[in-house]
Image (cartoon, grey):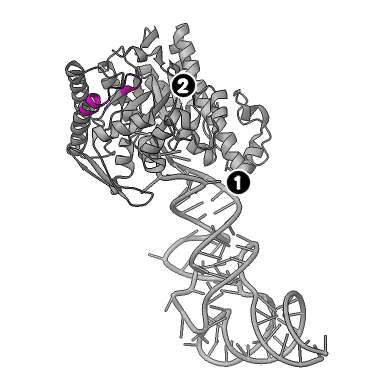
Amino acid sequence: MNENFRFELQAYDARSGARAGVLHTPHGDIETPTFMPVGTRASVKALTRTQLLDLNAQIILGNTYHLSLRPGGDFMAEAGGLHNFMAWPRPLLTDCGGFQIFSLKDTMKLDDEGVSFQSILDGSKHRWTPESNMRLQQQLGADILMQLDVCAPYPAERAEIELAMRRSVAWASRCRLEQDNPQQALFAIVQGGMHTDLRLENIRRLKEIEAETSHFEGYALGGYSVGEPHEIMLESMAEVCPSLPEDKPHYLMGLGNPTSMLASINLGMDMFDSVLPTRTARLGTAFSSEGRLNLRNARFTHDFSPLDPNCTCPTCASHSRAYLRHLVQSKEITGAVLLSVHNVHYLLDLTRKARAALLAGTFQDFLKEWYESPASNDY
RNA sequence: GGGGGUGUGCCCGAGUGGCUAAAGGGGAUGGGCUGUAAACCCAUUGGCUAUGCCUACCGUGGUUCGAAUCCACGCGCCCCCA
């Protein structure tokens, strides 16, 4: 085990797989469950680092695909790494770019050894192997690195999902062998779509790799939140989560829907990331205790009440729905900022409340209350 | 006073005899957004007793089988010369 990334479990829910813990890192502790805002290009869109610090974000993401194309891996090393470059003192996680293999698949060509692709910025040709991807992530210097994986779409043929899973497993092993910097943790990613047997096989193989090489500091579930219905994802996860190594952090990649997040915490997930809060904010939608509010809707024109009366964020402290709607309608950049502050706060606050309930032993009551409230109507 | 131009749906604007309820923008209204090619994308946007009908391209009248489109007069706006 890498002692720089000790995961300390602090509380378990007696009636579910839910737990609270702390992941120690060289840049500070991450208290779980937690939500991680996504800062793809060394920026959580519309938010300054001061705002993120004030919101108490404990860890944010960067993206290897985007940052390696611009400003580039060598540049990032010269800049002293991503922490230094963007002046972020707390933990960072870099996503490998596996999601871009999925979302930019028209520019990608996969084989067993790696992936060749053309830059979306200038069409230039690039090639990643698991090893070269690890070196890029080492140049970025985040605390947590994600193995290079292949994220299959939904829906997809079983054969395609199985191939993605097998490549991901093989690449997990190669990433593990390449990534030997003790200042950086490596998380494995489990694929397999909605096929439980593939997911369980993936987890078994990862455990074998750990026996042969060294441990992964965390396990992530990839390939969820890619368009499948919420219930199908939860059914699949319910069968998969019990097989995840209990003593390691469990990271559900790409999930930002509040209700799905709580349901996933209930199944034993500890970490979440998603662009949902920041993207929907820029596009005019706010999470709230009443469910999602689309501030473009005419019904808010004369609504001078606070965005969410039950929210303690800076936006809600000062601004009315009518004002925020006006900013959104006018495409004022301040609207994107204020709603991003609110939405990120909302998810951070939600995971903090879940954690507090877990530590207090009242998590199931907390969940019940959530499902009875209009906030659970957040789709 | 003389000459030239122009008037289109909430706004801008294309269209100069039938394929026009009228391109394209904007605005408005609604929807979507989940490891970010997203301050983006999609849909709708005259009315109705609705596989059809009515009203509609400044106004009135006319030409024509048929007019936003051609003609006459009127009204409004713009430019140039005096």
Image point (39%, 22%), residue name? A271
Is A158 rendered above or below residue B69? above
Q: Is residue A128 left or right of residue B57?
A: left
Locate residue B55: give its quadrant.
Answer: bottom right
Q: CA distance from mark 1 to mark 2?
A: 32 Å
Q: Which residue is mark 1?
A: A329
Q: Is residue A145 left or right of residue A375?
A: left
Answer yes or no: is residue A241 visible.
Answer: yes
Q: Residue furthest front?
A: A78
Using the image as rendered, state which of residue A269 and residue B52 is in the foreground. A269
The magenta segment: A174-186
* Label of residue A371 in the image: 2
Answer yes or no: is residue A299 visible.
Answer: no
Is A229 rendered above or below residue A331? above
Is label 1 in a helix, a strand or a loop?
helix
**Badge 2 amino acid:** Tyr
Residue A136 position in % (x across, y down): 32, 34
**Badge 1 amino acid:** Gln
Q: Is residue A64 left or right of residue A352?
A: left
Locate residue B19: give its quadrant.
Answer: bottom left
